Image (tube, helix red, strand yellow):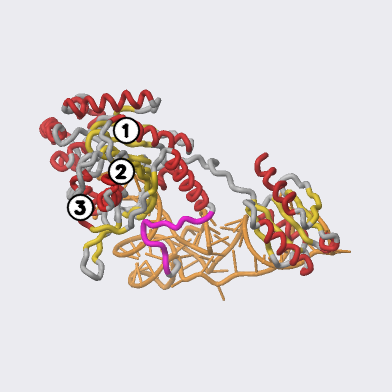
Amino acid sequence: MPLYTAVKGMNDILPPVSLRWSRMEEDLRLLAARLNYQEIRTPVVESLELFQRGLGETSDVVQKEMYVFEDKNGNKLALKPEGTAGVVRAFIEHSIGIEKPGPHKLFYIGPNFRYEKPQKGRYRQFHQFGLEIFGDPTPEMDAELIYAASLILDHFKVKGEIRVNSIGCPACRPAYRETLVNYFRPKAEELCGDCRRRIDINPLRLIDCKADSPRTRWNDIPVITDHLCPQCASDFDRLKKALEIFHVPFVVDPFIVRGLDYYVKTAFEITADTGGTQNAIAGGGRYDNLVAETGGDATPATGFAIGLERLLSVVPQDFYGAQPLAMGFALYDGGIPALLHLTKHLSHHPVRYMAEYTPRKFKNALQKANKLGARHIFIFGEDEVKNAQVLYKDLATGDQQLFGQHETMTIVSMLMEKEIEK
RNA sequence: GUGGGUGUAGUUCAAUGGUAGAGCACCGGAUUGUGAUUCCGGGCGUUGUGGGUUCGAGUCCCAUUACCCACCCCA
């Protein structure tokens, strides 16, 4: 046991996996830019109250999963457990919605923290990429957002299932909740202990119970989509029509629930086979009342977040191929100056390269390159130095040839070409 | 917060209650400049930690801790 280990639920990301991470983040930024979302970076720490008000006092996240602490001034702060609250706070604080007409499209990427018991796909520090749109109330914009999510899945060659729902609004949800409670109360004795408690606390969750799913036992469970107010019902209709025009494959799942209180109307989730039971790789929906509840002018908004650990777990293993490595060796001290020159020249070009400045025997150089998985090697021995040349060898094919030491550009283009043909 | 599983070398794993081992990896070498290979040499590790049972514990018992998985919850 080492003296110090990483904090529970917080992971080091090491090579070569770290390369997959940075490539994935790079791709997400490019995709966001292409769809005209601009990055917003908010602090990792916010006032505790922001989250309590925004996410809902009764949500699990607020009740038991936040990292809460006081600073030396006695301010109650929290590590952000999700991305939206901070973005909303910044949106209001900097009058983003007032300076220009909407819609305002923003994206964020970064760490979040929840004090949960770690398991596959669930960590105490986890990372999310999210899109948020402020100032547009239409279900068509929700559809566009979901379309963006589907483009992201496509980009990463991820097979996910997009599940959409409308969870109603303050006008119709309470009534549905009541209906649901009335439906289950007489059946309480047939439910598991957890579910009996959930009847009053969170009847929507009850339906998803994994112990013995009520969904498979009763087929007449009331669904919210039958209990929407006229406005919500028509919006949900428009959402589905728009998704069809976008050719986004989706299923309606009337039992999708959001864990955070701020969602209204459109709610959606993307699930995929992550190898564990934490199979939701993205989730989001509309949150029309959050800006006003946070103290801003009433501003309709919609957004979603992708869990990056989960996304990466379903990105095909070969999606990011390793860039071939080139190595340089000297066979004796006299080869080192030329080797240094090669290092200097190659560092101006996008080839993955490293040198070793301890002279090695020819055979050892090949062995070492082989062990490190290098494909290209450059060798400076007595003969080469004498003739101002460098020996190049392709370990994959066994081919080798001599280059003049000053033919840097020839060498670089040769390396680049080989990379392309792969 | 609740369950279950697992902790032995850098790593993957062995070891009927009787001296802690192997593969891989790593380092060096096998007549002078050509790589999977082969051969030789190189590891005393508080068996996660603390107690207990026993003549004797990696092995059995208790506690504790870490990791993994699941519930819960969610991205």
**What amino acid is at disc 1?**
Met
Say yes or no: labels 2 and 3 on the same chain: yes
Q: Residue at x 25, y 50 (%)?
A: A92
Give the image location of residue A389, x and y in percent. 81, 57
Name the one closer to the observer, A69 or A2: A69
Callout 2: 10 Å neighbours few (<14), some, many (20+)? Answer: few
Residue A121: tell me if it is visible.
Answer: no
- The alpha-carbon separation of the residues under discs 1 and 2 comes to 18 Å
Do the residues under discs 2 and 3 have CB atoms within 8 angstroms? no
Amino acid type at mark 3: Gln
Q: Same chain for the residues at labels 1 and 3, yes or no?
A: yes
Residue A220 located left or right of residue A285: left
Q: Residue at x 50, y 53 (%)?
A: A18
Q: Secondary structure at mark 1?
A: helix
Subunit that carries the residue with mark 3: A
Image-quadrant location for residue A29: top left
Q: Which mark is residue A100?
A: 2
Asked whether A6 falls inside the magenta stretch, the response is yes
Range covered by the magenta-colored residues? A4-15
Which numbered circle lies on residue A52?
Answer: 3
**Marks 2 and 3, Cα distance to the nearest angstrom?**
29 Å
**In the displayed structure image, the side of residue A343 where residue B58 appears, left or right:** left
Q: Is residue A64 magenta?
A: no
Q: Secondary structure at mark 2?
A: loop
Read off the residue under disc 1.
A141
Residue A244: where, in percent of width, then height?
A: 36, 24
Q: Is residue A180 above or below residue A245?
A: below
Residue appearing at x 32%, y 23% in the figure: A241
- Quarter of the figure with the N terminus of chain A: bottom left
